[in-house]
Amino acid sequence: MSLHRITCDFLLFTALIHFMGITCLPAICNLDCQVNINKTVLAKFCSASAFKLQGRCCVNTTSPDQLDIIGIDLQQCGMTQKKFSQGIDGINTLQFIYLQGNDIDALNITDFHRNTGIQNLSIPVNLSCPGGIKSWESIEIKTSETTCVGEKNPCISEKLTCPLNSHCVHSGIDMSECLCDEDYHGYKCMNKGKFPTVPFAIGITASTVALCIFLWCTQRRYVKSDVKNK
Ligand SMILES: *[C@@H]1O[C@H](CO)[C@@H](O)[C@H](O)[C@H]1NC(C)=O
Ligand SMILES: *[C@@H]1O[C@H](CO)[C@@H](O)[C@H](O)[C@H]1NC(C)=O
Ligand SMILES: *[C@@H]1O[C@H](CO)[C@@H](O)[C@H](O)[C@H]1NC(C)=O
Ligand SMILES: *[C@@H]1O[C@H](CO)[C@@H](O)[C@H](O)[C@H]1NC(C)=O
Ligand SMILES: *[C@@H]1O[C@H](CO)[C@@H](O)[C@H](O)[C@H]1NC(C)=O
């Protein structure tokens, strides 16, 4: 198989996934851990709700083209700060996270990426809640774990303000950003009018398809001439 053909297949495959919205469960949901997932709080919560337990993750499967991971139980999974952070990169729908029973020596707000709706975060007792007390509605300390309850939106809890034509958006634990108001874009949100996203997307799609057709055609020619030469 030639490189062109592989590239072409890859592009088509990527486009297919993109348009059909097919998503796969991330690897972190399939870890082997010492705590039986069926005996966890997450499993009980998940079976009592409309969600589905898949590996160590509780998934919202309501919408067929989208798998939203609501919860993840990583108790006694040999987690480290780095493994956790890398494992959940790209997931931003987490509400319940269990990390107790791991040798994690620190946790940083950035390890949680852009999760803004965390309800319960259980961590080893010796760690403090990421972002500190101000980032959570309450903190419950037990002998086996500390639970940080109710992630706060700093835009509201700290009454953050943004420059002209922009507004504050919660973007992670103790993190926020100023986004341009609707109808404004560009440097300091000074340009009025919608950013041309649709023509931009069409441009990208069209060039991908064109490249694919081009590669496919050139590859076909090689295949034919190969046959003739035999
Ligand atoms: C958890 O329960 C499911 C369904 O009852 C079962 O298929 C699975 O093997 C169980 N997992 C463990 C680790 O016991
Ligand atoms: C589950 O997914 C559906 C469809 O995407 C959405 O409407 C609903 O709010 C989700 N539920 C939760 C709790 O996130
Ligand atoms: C968290 O990570 C960021 C970026 O890697 C770093 O700048 C910051 O100092 C870290 N904070 C703590 C408390 O370790
Ligand atoms: C979340 O934390 C609250 C407060 O500790 C607790 O009552 C609730 O059972 C927890 N839910 C889950 C699913 O862990
Ligand atoms: C956690 O804290 C307890 C009590 O302060 C201490 O005995 C224990 O050694 C600490 N564990 C770690 C891993 O730091």
Image (tube, grey):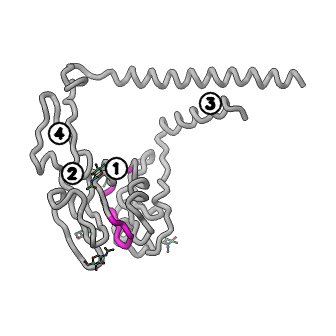
Residue to which mark 4 is pinned: 168
Amino acid type of disc 3?
Cys
Q: Secondary structure at mark 2?
A: loop
Amino acid type of disc 2?
Asp
Measured Cα–Cα span from mark 2 to mark 3: 43 Å
Say whether disc 1 or disc 3 marks the residue closer to the N-terminus.
3
Amino acid type of disc 4?
Cys
Residue at image position (49%, 44%) is 22
**Pointers 2 and 3 in contact (CB under 8 A)?**
no
Magenta segment range? 91-105
Say whether disc 2 or disc 1 marks the residue closer to the N-terminus.
1
Amino acid type of disc 1?
Asn
Q: Which mark is residue 8?
A: 3
Taking the magenta stretch, the answer to whether it contains residue 97 is: yes
Determine crowd level at label 3: few under 14, some 14-19, many 20+ residues with C-alpha closer than 10 A: many
Q: Secondary structure at mark 3?
A: helix
Measured Cα–Cα span from mark 4 to mark 2: 13 Å
Residue to which mark 2 is pinned: 174
Residue at image position (23%, 63%) is 129
**Pointers 3 and 4 in contact (CB under 8 A)?**
no
Q: Nearer the viewer, residue 106 or 178?
A: 106
Furthest-left residue in this view: 159
